[in-house]
Image (spheres, rainbow, N blue to C red):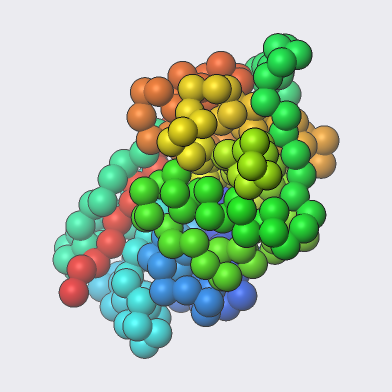
């Protein structure tokens, strides 16, 4: 599964508005933001970088005023992490990822559960972006660029889903990238604090996963941030499958 997820990471970064490929690395850049969580690189499976390759990679980021950063499944390119560490990179985190297949997907059965909707109006995309920014404690700022990315995800074959709050805004939501190489990444599952523990995250996750299977994906994968969210995803049918490394260069 690691190689499949890594091949997806490569394909997904190649969808960015600007793409640079150098020394076995693919750098995906969105000129609308300087966020290192949007602008980052990943290696092709099997990449064996030289010092010159790593230096060229760093230069791609520096020339654009961006922080050099990578996300990847380390088992697919074992020589990459040591080369980056030797160049001064430091590990941010190692995340376990979970995978769901059509055979393991479990859809909610409660008739009185949250109603999951598909956004179509500008104000709905704006409400989702604002809710996700609040859900993640401001790590991602609510912005016109964030709204545009959500709409672009849906327009380009991915999916966005949300649960509406009583006042008409968004209680929680998430998005899923368009399938590539047979799989899709579900990301950014967030619920505003006052609406947590109401089944919103599970309902949105199930709806997005089902939508990707309907579009032909053979699996959907995601990363989780804690035991609570892991239990939610496992309840939908996601199972542990591997790890991904986040690594960056300060200064």
Figure check: 180 above or below 200: below
Q: Residue at the location (44% across, 27% down)?
A: 229
Question: In the image, is 110 to the left or to the right of 241?
Answer: right
- The answer to whether one can see residue 9 in this image is yes
Figure check: 217 above or below 85: above
Q: Quadrant of the image for the C terminus?
A: bottom left
Residue found at the very far top of the displayed protein: 110
Question: In the image, is 198 to the left or to the right of 114?
Answer: left
Relative image position of residue 182 (x, y in whole percent): 71, 42
Relative image position of residue 98 (x, y in whole percent): 50, 30
Question: In the image, is 48 to the left or to the right of 151?
Answer: left
Decide which of 216, 158 is in the foreground and name it. Answer: 158
Decide which of 115, 159 is in the foreground and name it. Answer: 115
Q: Residue at the location (38% across, 35% down)?
A: 225
Residue found at the very far front of the displayed protein: 167
Q: Residue at the location (32% across, 72% down)?
A: 67
Figure check: 109 above or below 17: above
**Dividing the picture into quarters, in which one does residue 138 lie?**
bottom left
Relative image position of residue 69 (x, y in whole percent): 34, 64
Figure check: 61 above or below 139: below
Q: Residue at the location (31% across, 41% down)?
A: 94
């Amino acid at each position: 599964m690691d190689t499949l997820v890594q091949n997806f990471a490569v394909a997904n970064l190649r969808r960015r508005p600007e793409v640079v490929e150098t020394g076995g690395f693919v750098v995906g850049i969105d000129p609308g933001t300087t966020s290192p969580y949007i602008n980052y690189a990943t290696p092709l499976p099997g990449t064996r970088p030289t010092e010159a390759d790593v230096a060229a990679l760093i230069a791609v980021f520096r020339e654009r005023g961006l922080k050099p950063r990578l996300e990847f499944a380390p088992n697919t390119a074992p020589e990459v992490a040591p080369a980056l560490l030797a160049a001064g990179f430091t590990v941010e985190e190692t995340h376990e990822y979970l995978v769901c297949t059509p055979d393991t997907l479990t859809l909610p059965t409660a008739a009185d559960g949250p109603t999951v909707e598909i956004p179509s109006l500008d104000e709905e995309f704006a409400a989702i972006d604002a809710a996700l920014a609040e859900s993640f404690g401001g790590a991602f700022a609510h912005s016109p660029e964030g709204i545009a990315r959500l709409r672009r995800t849906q327009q380009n074959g991915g999916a966005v889903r949300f649960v509406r709050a009583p006042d008409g805004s968004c209680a929680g939501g998430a998005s899923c990238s368009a399938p590539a190489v047979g799989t899709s990444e579900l990301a950014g599952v967030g619920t505003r604090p006052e609406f947590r523990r109401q089944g919103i995250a599970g309902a949105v996750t199930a709806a997005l996963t089902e939508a990707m299977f309907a579009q032909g994906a053979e699996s959907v994968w995601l990363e989780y941030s804690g035991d609570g969210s892991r239990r939610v995803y496992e309840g939908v049918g996601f199972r542990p499958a591997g790890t991904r490394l986040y690594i960056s260069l300060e200064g």
